[in-house]
Amino acid sequence: MTEYIIIGVFALVGLLFAGAAMVFSRIVAPRFPDTGKKLDAYESGEDAIGTARIQFKLGYYLFALVFLVFDVEAIFLFPALANLGPAADGEAGQISPLFVWGEIVVFVAVLGFALYYAWRKKVLEWD
């Protein structure tokens, strides 16, 4: 029961801290009337020219998503490879090396399937 009291106290202190920060910001923050330039976009001191709504080629978006898929897949391979060392040494309570290799093969197969799919859909062609 004392664990729940500790969690409740931490939650209450966190809420009070966040609320106090918001109230303090409201009291101390300067307020200036809108001078017409306040709501303009700011980029390196240059005035905005034209509209911000321009059309991007869909291929750029798809290329970025394919890169993200491969990047995340590569990052997720590192924990499996890190577990492979202790597993191969036979330390007690570790995962078997065959299981780790199986996970790596499945992961690389998913990666290969994604690459094959992107290749077939011609996502990797840069026009």
Image: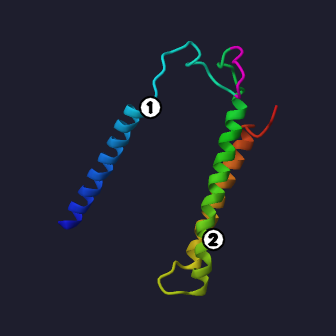
> Splitting the image into 4 quarters, where does residue 54 fall?
top right
The residue indicated by pointer 2 is 81
Tell me where residue 88 appears, x and y as whole percent: 61, 83
Residue at the (71%, 39%) spot, across then down: 63
Q: Please tell me whether residue 45 belongs to the stretch shown in magenta.
A: yes
Residue 55 vertical position relative to residue 122 in the rendered view, above or below: above
Res 29 label: 1
Tell me where residue 99 appears, x and y as whole percent: 56, 73
- In the image, taking residue 29 as reference, residue 58 lies left or right, namely right
> Splitting the image into 4 quarters, where does residue 56 fall?
top right
- Image quarter where the N terminus lies is bottom left
Residue at the (69%, 46%) spot, across then down: 67
**Residue flagged by tag 2: what amino acid is it?**
Leu
- In the image, taking residue 31 as reference, residue 13 lies left or right, namely left
- Image quarter where the C terminus lies is top right
Q: Please tell me whether residue 25 belongs to the stretch shown in magenta.
A: no
The one nearer the camera, 55 or 117, is 55
**Local SS, label 1:** loop
**Residue flagged by tag 1: what amino acid is it?**
Ala
> Splitting the image into 4 quarters, where does residue 109 fall?
bottom right
Residue at the (32%, 41%) spot, across then down: 19
Report how far apart the C-alphas of labels 1 and 2 lie in the structure: 51 Å
**Local SS, label 2:** helix
The one nearer the camera, 46 or 56, is 46
